[in-house]
Amino acid sequence: MANKKGKRRSFGAVRQLASGRWQVRYRDPETSLLRPAEKTYETKTDAQVALTHIEADITRGQWTNPDAGSVNFADYATAWLRDRKLADRTRERNESVMRLHIVPTFGTGSIADVTTARVRSWRGKLIAAGVGEPTTVKAYQLLRALMNTAVDDEMIRRNPCRIKGADSYDVPERPVLSVAEVFGLADSIAPRYRLLVLLAAFTTLRFGELAALRRKDIDLAGRVVVVRRAQAELQNGRLFDKAPKSAAGVRTVSFPAELVDEIRRHLEHYAAAGQEGHLFVGPQGGQLRRSNFRDDWVKARKAAGVSAELHFHDLRHTGNTLASTAGASTRELMTRMGHSSSRAALIYQHMTSDRDRAIADRLGAMIRKEGGGRASGDSVEGSERT
């Protein structure tokens, strides 16, 4: 093909097909074979512009093989999940989200078929169908991670998951108990679970960390509990111990001296035998399960008169808030919580600041009730009138 100066193009060519449309052809930079562009064009000018763009992409190293994205989405997702290094429980959860919420929409098509418009429509349909916000966010995050890998594999040029704010959600404020309410809840639950409630609140351990504790993890003399592992449960009911979420999760947490007698009594009456025996077991001596514990928790919550919205995990929330109120620094909160990031610790310190402001407001109400500051108030009012 000749250009305006009568010279042939050094890159590619355009030609008119029998249909009247124009086709672009160029040398594949990977195989050096002549290949057509993935679509045809209405005019010769459109075809020439497209060829110029393809040449520029190849020159900049940004060209993507159009055939690479033709891989079936479901097949690619299966291989992607299989090759990821994940904990058993995380793998099970990701596979479930992929199977239930992602593959039904994208599975029959190719990787290249996943566009930003389709992702936006898919997310909107999940929300409209009543899928919970945490699950919707998790599904979006999982799809985005998969498509990031597709970009790295040069199957697509850019990630289509580009919806602002779709990867996060606002967590509603959780209930916080007072110390008296914590003990009221402990008084109301079955005696074998009394210490479970108290340790959750005053050491801020997670349920899985508490369920995995052994006798040897309790040091009464030093008043510390050692967190070495966490219990996890698969959907098939299998229980297993795993390492904590991060290296910071392996930690030693002090407990108040007021809990020593509670722990001693629990060790005597309810813990399994031997140093490797679990600290908390069910009525029949089996390992503690969330499902078996739930009925006891609901009954105790009702008997104690606390919020019906209170989750067991909110005891950890309560404990972190109390520790912050007691003056724990960001680093100390991070250590007790088993976090390697300061983000969560700063949230609790912010909450404490808010509570301190609320206390100041209540003090102000007391001052006003007793008539304090009336003179200064009258002075202000007088100056405003003048």
Image (tube, rainbow, N blue to C red):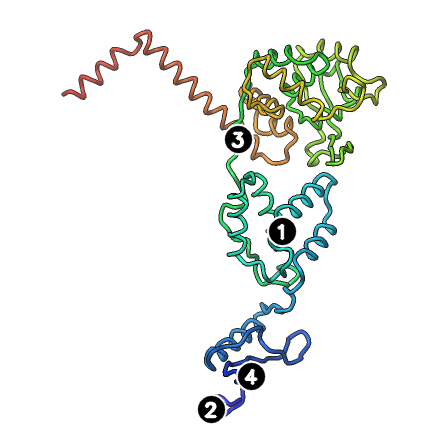
Badge 2 local density, few (<14 within 10 Å), some, or many (20+)?
A: few
Q: Position of residue 40 (x, y in %)?
A: 53, 76
Q: CA distance from mark 3 to mark 1?
A: 38 Å
**C-alpha separation, residue under disc 2 versus residue under disc 3:** 68 Å
Closer to the camera: disc 4 or disc 3? 4
* Labels 2 and 3 touching (C-beta < 8 A): no
Distance from the alpha carbon under mark 1 to that under mark 4: 41 Å
Q: Identify the mark at residue 104; answer none if there is no mark.
A: 1
Quarter of the image with the C terminus in it? top left
Relative vertical location of residue 116 with respect to residue 337 in this rendering, above or below: below
Q: Residue at x 31, y 9 (%)?
A: 372
Mark 3 lies on residue: 347
The crowd level at tag 4 (other Cα within 10 Å; few <14, some 14-19, many 20+) is some
Q: Earlier in the sequence, mark 4 or mark 2?
A: 2
Kindly identify the residue that appears in the image at 49 percent across and 92 percent down: 6
Q: Are marks 3 and 1 in contact (CB under 8 Å)?
A: no
Residue extending furthest left? 386
Between marks 4 and 2 in the image, the one whose residue lies nearer the viewer: 4
Q: Which mark is residue 5?
A: 2
Name which residue lies at 21% across and 15% down.
Answer: 379
Q: Amino acid at mark 3?
A: Ile
Quarter of the image holding residue 108? bottom right
Element at badge 1?
helix
Q: Secondary structure at mark 2?
A: loop
The numbered disc on residue 13 is 4
Using the image, determine if residue 273 lies above or below residue 96: above
In the rendering, at what x and y percent does residue 324 appear?
Answer: 55, 23
The mark that comes first in sequence, 2 or 3, is 2
Sequence-first disc among 2 and 1: 2
Distance, label 4 to label 3, CA atoms, is 61 Å
Q: CA distance from mark 4 to mark 2?
A: 16 Å
